[in-house]
Image (tube, grey):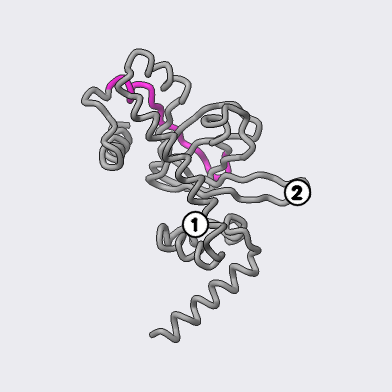
Amino acid sequence: MGTSIDTLQELLFDLAGVLPADTAPLFAMTTPVLLETNEAYIREEENSRRLAFIEQGVIRAYTIKENGDEATLLLRWEGQFIASHDTIINRQPSRFIYRALEPVKLLQIDYDVLEEILKTHPEYEPLRNFFLMKMLAESLKMLESFVTQSPEERYRELLAERFDLVNRVPDKYIASMLGITPVSLSRIRKRMHTKGKTST
């Protein structure tokens, strides 16, 4: 548990410098959570306002369309935060399912408890703003990528950010997140492989 807290504390200091000197009240409300492969973290229509730092593993957020097909919204992995935008920002039930694709280790904060802590420790307000702005920035980046980038560009960006995901996440989930079919993803990979050969 100490290692998890040190990791999260170091990350927050590095990214935002938002934590005051006394972190005891904040970390007293964190709880470690372990998820097994295929276990749901947040279910569709759930109102739970959980916010978690991923120490290990990959989580997929997806929805099931009327025709039964699954549409992947996002993937989150080590060193990132996972939460339902619906429950935390919009204060409405989650429209998506958040499920572990492999064993996952989380450090979780109940967002409602965080808001209660803020009543007696207003010095943590920048931390809440940090979480909210990070979630909004991720949503905007995802939206902009679909407008300004091709599927191949989005795939290249994913590889640059986390190359090992291609060996940890099934192709159909990656393709769905990119807004293409697994066949199209295969073509992109083949094209990239061919380009790589000709450039060497």
Question: Is residue 128 rendered magenta in the image?
Answer: no
- Name the kind of residue labelled 2 in the image: Gly
Residue 67 x/y as whole percent: 78, 50
Q: Quadrant of the C terminus?
A: bottom left
Disc 2 marks which residue? 68
Q: Nearer the viewer, residue 171 or 1?
A: 171
The N terminus, quarter of image: top left
Residue, x 63% and y 29% (percent of image)? Answer: 93
Left or right: 164 in relation to 1: right
Q: How many marks?
A: 2
Residue 2, placed above or below residue 38: above
Disc marking residue 168:
1
State yes or no: residue 30 in magenta. Answer: yes
Looking at the image, is mark 2 or mark 1 earlier in the sequence? 2
Q: Is residue 154 left or right of residue 14?
A: right
- Residue 116 image position (x, y, % from top left): 42, 16
Q: Is 24 drawn above or below residue 87 in the view shown?
A: above
User: Secondary structure beneath disc 2?
Assistant: loop
- Image location of residue 138, percent across then percent down: 47, 46
Indicate the position of residue 104 as horizontal and vertical percent values.
46, 42
Residue 128, picture quadrant: top left
Q: Nearer the viewer, residue 163 or 195?
A: 195
> CB under 8 Å between callouts 2 and 1?
no
Question: For the residues marked 2 and 1, what is the alpha-carbon distance in whole angstroms?
Answer: 24 Å
**Magenta segment range?**
24-39
Specify the quadrant of the image occupied by residue 16: top left
* In the image: residue 191, left or right of residue 66: left
**Residue under the image location 54 percent in, 36 percent down:** 85
